[in-house]
Image: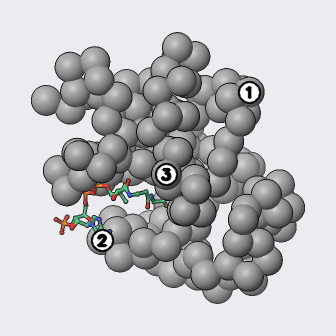
Amino acid sequence: MVKLVKATLNDIPQMQKMVVSEVKDGVILERSEDEVATNIRSYILAKIENELVGYVALHIHSPRLAEIRSLIVSSEHRGKSIGKKMVESALVEAKKLGVGEEVLVLTYLPEFFIKMNFIEIAKETIPEHKIWTDCIKCIHFPICNEISLVYKIAG
Ligand SMILES: CC(C)(COP(=O)(O)OP(=O)(O)OC[C@H]1O[C@@H](n2cnc3c(N)ncnc32)[C@H](O)[C@@H]1OP(=O)(O)O)[C@@H](O)C(=O)NCCC(=O)NCCS
């Protein structure tokens, strides 16, 4: 049985270990231990009998905009709806917190998010502070093929 729980600082070593190959491939942006710690309240973890099997972060940019970041399910547990459950839970949290307009994601897997009612947007409309705080750290910057999508909170 998969349980979704909030992360604690003790989870960080396992979280970092889980994304090593995706970070190397440029699918997930590298985050330092300190950055994860600073944002620890953003993370939702999926656990099966206390074993970490995936996680996602809901990062708040502004009262209107949040972002899904660092979505990962360990390779041996993919295809069991764990990713979907975590994203749904992040969207519920965004609504509960009162995020006013939308939840952004930048991804190479648009199909996964389109199934969850995200819609593609033009890259030029991504908020600038996202580009300048995160994208510049990415190994693919500035030639990036990621697709930007948003989930509209209202309506
Ligand atoms: C993307 C990822 C998190 C999906 O997690 P998952 O638990 O395997 O996905 P789920 O089982 O919840 O799939 C939900 C739906 O998306 C579909 N889906 C899952 N992976 C997909 C993929 N790679 N391409 C297209 N559709 C996909 C599933 O078929 C399923 O569809 P259904 O609801 O019609 O059955 C996982 O494959 C992963 O960790 N990948 C590596 C890291 C990565 O790419 N992260 C995304 C960064 S934005």
Q: CA distance from mark 2 to mark 1?
A: 33 Å
Q: Which residue is mark 2?
A: 115
Quarter that holds the C terminus: bottom left
In the picture, measured across the screen, residue 42 lies left or right of residue 7, that is: right
x and y percentages locating residue 84 in the rendered image: 29, 53
Examine the rendered structure and indicate whether residue 35 appears above or below residue 153. above
* Helix, strand or loop under label 2: loop
x and y percentages locating residue 114 in the rendered image: 37, 74
Q: Which residue is mark 1?
A: 34
| Residue at far top of view | 10
* Mark 1 surroundings within 10 Å by alpha-carbon count, few (fewer than 14), some (14 through 19), many (20 or more): few
Of mark 2 and mark 1, the one earlier in the sequence is 1
Can you tell which of label 1 and label 3 is closer to the viewer?
3
Q: Quadrant of ligand 1?
A: bottom left
Q: CA distance from mark 1 to mark 3?
A: 20 Å
Q: Going 82% across and 63% down the picture, which residue do you hit?
A: 136
Q: Nearer the viewer, residue 127 or 144?
A: 144
Quarter that holds the N terminus: top left
Q: Going 20% across and 20% down the picture, which residue do you hit?
A: 49
| Residue at far left of view | 1
Q: Going 47% across and 27% down the picture, which residue do you hit?
A: 14
* Helix, strand or loop under label 3: helix
Of mark 2 and mark 3, the one earlier in the sequence is 3
Q: Report whether the residue tagged 2 is closer than 8 Å to ligand 1.
A: yes
Q: Which residue is mark 3?
A: 21
Of mark 1 and mark 3, the one earlier in the sequence is 3
* Helix, strand or loop under label 1: helix
x and y percentages locating residue 124 in the rendered image: 75, 83
- Tell me how the rendering is colored: one colour
- Give the residue type at disc 2: Lys
